[in-house]
Image: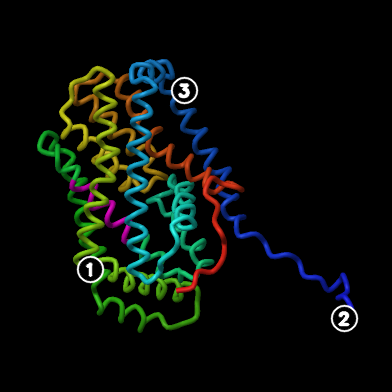
């Protein structure tokens, strides 16, 4: 019979991997409460009146279109991971993907990079997960620019937003496919300092993201991204119609897309402020009154951005609705 190990030598149980998820709950909840405060400040009566006109079935349709957006983007995410050599079972991958939404309200959605640290426990290297995230952001940006073009002819002042976004897309593609840039960074930053390591990881992520941009995958991902963001933009069109305004679908889609571009280029958390200001201004330009435009903006952002944050918090919560088996997945 073996003697039992002394109690003093007992190891402290490892910290649960869910602690990072739990840490997201309070910031996400505070962000939602902050936006509710904004709605109250901007005229809760107008928002409530608009919600009554839309009705519960209409709100359900808007949330359903947002779910279509998330589902299509998840399919694209799985395709990127598969292209990088990681076929993660959909259940754990879904919870990780949705949990990233808890940090959607960060500058450029950079907080969604938390998925990389969660996927690391499933044997997905950080450069690979960051390559998938970079490819996703690039696909989203391309889709939103294309949707914005639908109505830019009617509002020329917004063309510079699309032009800046298009230049950003071109720059990222140059960085992804420029072997000379990759070699130059790795040659110049060979040290063991933190900055040098981060730059090397960044270059490795750029190199890996090439695998996400084969002709076939690029075409499929572009279609998925376009359909995903069209679904939310179409929700704005329906919302405007249900509020009693006859707005062309192409214009409503463009208003949503241009607003998302403005929010992304503002680098504010979740595009807060920039997206709302541009959307409200464009809705007023299209004939809505100021209070109605604010109400429509608050409602559509609640049904898209803040609905995503709420889902992310639910997925990140202890015992979330999709449980993740934190075991290593063999390739």
In this figure, what is the number of numbered marks?
A: 3
Dot 2 alpha-carbon crowd within 10 angstroms: few under 14, some 14 to 19, many 20 or more: few
Q: Which residues are magenta?
A: 135-146
Q: Which mark is residue 40?
A: 3
| Position of residue 87 in the picture relative to residue 158 (left or right) | right
| Position of residue 249 in the picture relative to residue 314 (left or right) | left
Depicted 1 relative to depicted 68: above or below = below
Q: Quadrant of residue 303?
A: top left
Residue 238 picture location, percent across and down: 26, 27
Residue 49 picture location, percent across and down: 38, 15
Q: How is the image coloured?
A: rainbow
Dot 3 alpha-carbon crowd within 10 angstroms: few under 14, some 14 to 19, many 20 or more: some
CB-based contact (under 8 Å), mark 1 and mark 3: no
Residue 160 picture location, percent across and down: 18, 46
Q: Which mark is residue 214?
A: 1
Dot 1 alpha-carbon crowd within 10 angstroms: few under 14, some 14 to 19, many 20 or more: few
Q: Nearer the viewer, mark 2 or mark 1?
A: 2
What residue appears at the point 19 percent right and 42 percent down from the top-left corner? 148
């Amino acid at each position: 019979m073996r003697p039992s190990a002394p109690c003093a030598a007992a190891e402290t149980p490892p910290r649960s991997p869910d602690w990072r998820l739990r840490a997201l709950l309070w910031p996400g909840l505070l962000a939602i409460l902050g936006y509710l405060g904004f709605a109250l400040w901007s005229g809760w009566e107008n928002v409530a009146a608009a919600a009554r006109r839309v009705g519960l079935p209409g709100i359900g349709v808007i949330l359903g279109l947002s779910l279509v957006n998330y589902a299509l983007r998840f399919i694209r995410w799985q395709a990127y991971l598969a292209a990088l050599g990681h076929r993660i079972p959909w259940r754990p991958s879904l919870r990780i993907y949705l949990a990233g939404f808890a940090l959607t309200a960060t500058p450029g959605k950079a907080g969604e990079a938390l998925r990389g640290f969660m996927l690391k426990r499933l044997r997905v290297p950080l450069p690979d997960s960051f390559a998938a995230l970079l490819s996703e952001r690039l696909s989203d940006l391309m889709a939103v620019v294309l949707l914005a073009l639908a109505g830019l002819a009617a509002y020329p002042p917004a063309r510079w937003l699309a032009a800046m976004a298009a230049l950003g897309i071109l720059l990222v593609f140059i960085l992804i496919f420029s072997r000379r840039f990759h070699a130059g960074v790795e040659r110049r930053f060979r040290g063991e300092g933190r900055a040098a390591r981060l730059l090397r990881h960044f270059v490795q992520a750029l190199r890996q993201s090439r695998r996400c941009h084969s002709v076939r995958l690029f075409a499929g991902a572009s279609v998925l991204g376009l359909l995903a963001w069209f679904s939310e933009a179409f929700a704005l069109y329906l919302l405007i119609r249900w509020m009693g305004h006859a707005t062309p679908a192409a214009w409503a889609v463009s208003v949503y897309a241009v607003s998302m571009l403005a929010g992304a280029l503002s680098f504010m958390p979740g595009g807060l402020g920039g997206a709302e200001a541009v959307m409200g201004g464009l809705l007023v330009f299209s004939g809505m009154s100021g209070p109605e435009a604010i109400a429509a903006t608050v409602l559509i952002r609640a049904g898209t951005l803040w609905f995503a944050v709420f889902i992310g918090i639910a997925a990140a919560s202890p015992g979330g609705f999709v449980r993740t088996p934190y075991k290593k997945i063999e390739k």
